[in-house]
Amino acid sequence: MELELWVIAALALVAVLTGFIDSIAGGGGLITVPALLFAGLPPQLALGTNKTQSIFATTMAFRNYTKAGLVDWRHEKWLALLAFAGAALGAFMVQRISPAVLQLIVPLFLMAVALYVLLSPRMDDVPSQERLSRRGYAPVATGIGFYDGFFGPGTGSFFAASQVGLRGEGLTRATANAKLFNMLTNLASVLLFAFGGKVIWAVGLSMAVGSMTGSWIGSHFAVKHGAKLIRPLLVVISIALTARLVWDWFSG
């Protein structure tokens, strides 16, 4: 499938905005996936191409958070690898199963994230009591990874909010760790979608340039401003994702 050059250029510009949003609060797929569908890509091609550009953005954000001392790879690597495995399974399944049922369930999860961020006094940069150990969090990481491979929008929000609520991390550090997990879930998804021939490389790599630019800007903003920037964006993205998915479901 081929797209006109001006369409590819427009998608790359869209990716700048989504890279910025995704590096801070997750949910960039709310914009990129509909944009790719609007450009004429079939759903599976849109998901695979979106993952291709997204991995560059999450890698850039991960790099910046790591340089700022907010990611401990050695401490988090096994959880990240479980998320990778979950995403690989999800990407494998979505190429064989209609996501219609998942699209009905996902808004409920996203609304729960939005409500938690709005109502919880602990969504800040002050660490709190850990409710789940790393071992206890493993099924959560794997499940979110599966969701990312299968569908995707809101994955960064799920990782960040669950680490604050379940692992007691401060919001900025949780957001940084979310980029580590999301980088590997994107990698797993890209590998599976590419193997299945569900990626348009010219579009994905062009958008990657835009998403890396936006991600570089966004992750620096997040490191500088912390929870006071991340919290409102996380709420807005969660609510917007919910509204979009509910609309898609009821509009058929």
Image (spheres, helix red, strand yellow):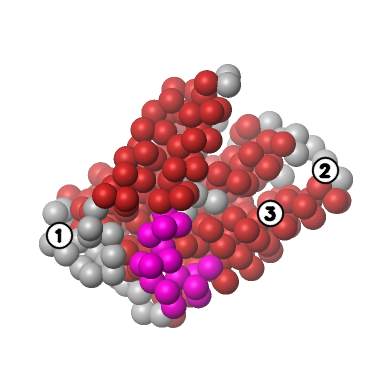
Chain part drawn in magenta? 218-234
Amino acid type at mark 1: Glu
Query: Which label is found at residue 130?
Result: 1
Position of the C terminus by quadrant: top right
User: Where residue 209 appears, x then y in whole percent?
Assistant: 68, 63
Q: Residue at x 42, y 54 (%)?
A: 234
* Element assignment for label 1: loop
Pointers 3 and 2 in contact (C-beta within 8 Å): no
Q: Nearer the viewer, residue 63 or 184?
A: 63
Q: Is residue 162 visible?
A: yes
Q: Which residue is mark 3?
A: 14
Query: Which label is found at residue 3?
Result: 2
Q: Residue at x 61, y 51 (%)?
A: 52
CA–CA distance in space, label 2 to label 1: 49 Å
* Element assignment for label 3: helix
Amino acid type at mark 3: Val
